[in-house]
Image: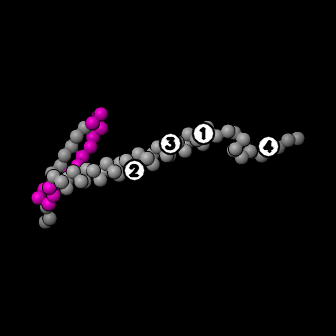
Amino acid sequence: MNQRLLCHFEVVVNEKYFQFSFVPGTVNFDDVNAALAEFKVEIDKLKVLEEERVNKAKQEADAPAEDKPLEPEVVS
């Protein structure tokens, strides 16, 4: 049976739960700091994508009505 021992950290920030784990003996503190830095880089990328999505949605909502295609109307 394969078993692993993990160092597992948990923290609650603003009532939100976060976790981080690693296998002890295979990493040092520099490795852990590098991993946390890489997580920060990835989170920053996600933040930029979310801001772009929100801005695009806002621009589409603020677009003038004449830019939207007209729906057909039957006139008698």
- The Cα–Cα distance between marks 4 and 2, rounded to whole angstroms, is 45 Å
Q: Residues within 10 Å of mark 4 (few under 14, many from 20)?
A: few
**Residue contact at pointers 3 and 1, CB within 8 angstroms:** no
Residue position for label 3:
54
Q: Is residue 22 visible?
A: no
Q: Judging from the image, what secondary structure is the residue with disc 4 in?
A: loop
- The Cα–Cα distance between marks 1 and 2, rounded to whole angstroms, is 25 Å
Residue position for label 4:
73
Q: Earlier in the sequence, mark 3 or mark 2?
A: 2
**Residue contact at pointers 1 and 4, CB within 8 angstroms:** no
Q: Which residues are magenta?
A: 13-28
Residue position for label 2:
45
Which quadrant holds residue 56?
top right
Residue position for label 1:
61
In the orientation shown, which residue stands out farthest toward the top?
A: 14
- The Cα–Cα distance between marks 4 and 3, rounded to whole angstroms, is 33 Å
Residue 57 location in percent, x, y?
55, 43
